[in-house]
Image: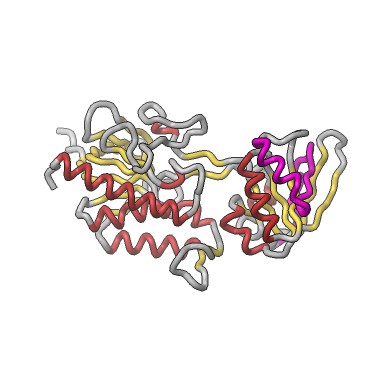
Amino acid sequence: MSEQIEHIHCLIIGSGPAGYTAAIYAARADLKPVMYTGPQPGGQLTITTDVENYPGYPDGIMGPEMMENFRKQAERLGTDIRYGMVTKVDFSGKPPYKVQIDENKDILADTVLISTGASAKWLGIPSETKLNGHGVSACAVCDGFFFRGKEVAIVGAGDTACEEASYLAKICSKVYMIVRKSEFRASKAMQHRVMNTPNIEIHFNSETDEIIGESKVEAVRIKNNKTNEMVTIPIGGFFVAIGHKPNTDIFKDYLEMDETGYLITTPGTSKTKVEGVFACGDAQDKIYRQAVTAAGSGCMAALDAERYISAKEFAM
């Protein structure tokens, strides 16, 4: 006889600030949440060094330590945290929905809270990996503060890159913008803002050859892809703003997404178009992408799930 399939009341897919906050609220509402952490328990903050902008930490905190605090709180309140990865979902029909874990286990879930996050796109050069968190960052708003008064570089050509360059220009002495092509992809308004900021220096037709430094970023070597000329620029920080990819591929057959893959929710809620399925954090937020906004949306998802369950009068 086949083993009976596990039936879960509230499934949270992915950890990070959104997932753990959803778990905290869901546990307090007695939804008996089960969380599968995904391949990077704690999310992007586990590869972040200092976090200075999360409320409640006047002296700042290390990213991994903060996520460990989130995990302990969710666990203390009753969340069943499991290390594993959701590899397939079936949101056809009505709940409970079948969800596959690690390609070898199926479970049923009455409600599903998606907090799978988004991954920054990187250039793919070894020095970028080596110095990640030591001067290399994919979030100027998160980490720009640490480079106040210094010279920095940023790679990218779209609205996000221009927005982050403008932000950095307010706190850094000089911003070098490295743009691969001969023009921006950003809107005219954003281009105009960047080009009219005195301390932003734009290098068109340029690519990053190497980020220089042993334990911290000291310079960047860029190559002009038209002339092959190499230039080395002394900097203290290097920012990558070439986009993010939401970790949502397994949901594409069932949920609405934008052209990049961000999940679409009903405005003002965490509800997807599939009943009982809710999305929070960077998997559905391409605008703010901050730990504090992710946590807030995790709270929304748990409250939406609680109200959905109450309305459906599921047996607790």
Say which quadrant the N terminus sits in: top left
Q: Image check: 24 left or right of 63?
A: left
Q: Nearer the viewer, residue 240 or 310?
A: 310
Q: Nearer the viewer, residue 171 or 221?
A: 171
User: Which residue is at a point 32% across and 49% down the rendered structure image?
Assistant: 35
Where residue 115 appears, as percent x and y from the top left, is: 39, 45
**Residue 277 drawn above or below residue 198:** above
User: Which residue is at a point 25% across and 56% down the rendered structure image?
Assistant: 27
Colour scheme of the rendered structure: secondary structure
Q: Nearer the viewer, residue 126 or 138?
A: 138
Q: Which residues are magenta?
A: 186-214
User: Which residue is at a point 67% across and 62% down the rendered structure image?
Assistant: 147
Where residue 286 appears, as percent x and y from the top left, is: 50, 42
Where residue 107 appears, as percent x and y from the top left, is: 25, 39
**Residue 197 drawn above or below residue 98:** below
Residue 209: in magenta span: yes
**Residue 186 drawn above or below residue 133:** above
User: Which residue is at a point 45% across and 56% down the rendered structure image?
Assistant: 292
Q: Image check: 284 left or right of 125?
A: left
Residue 286: in magenta span: no
Where residue 282 appears, as percent x and y from the top left, is: 46, 45
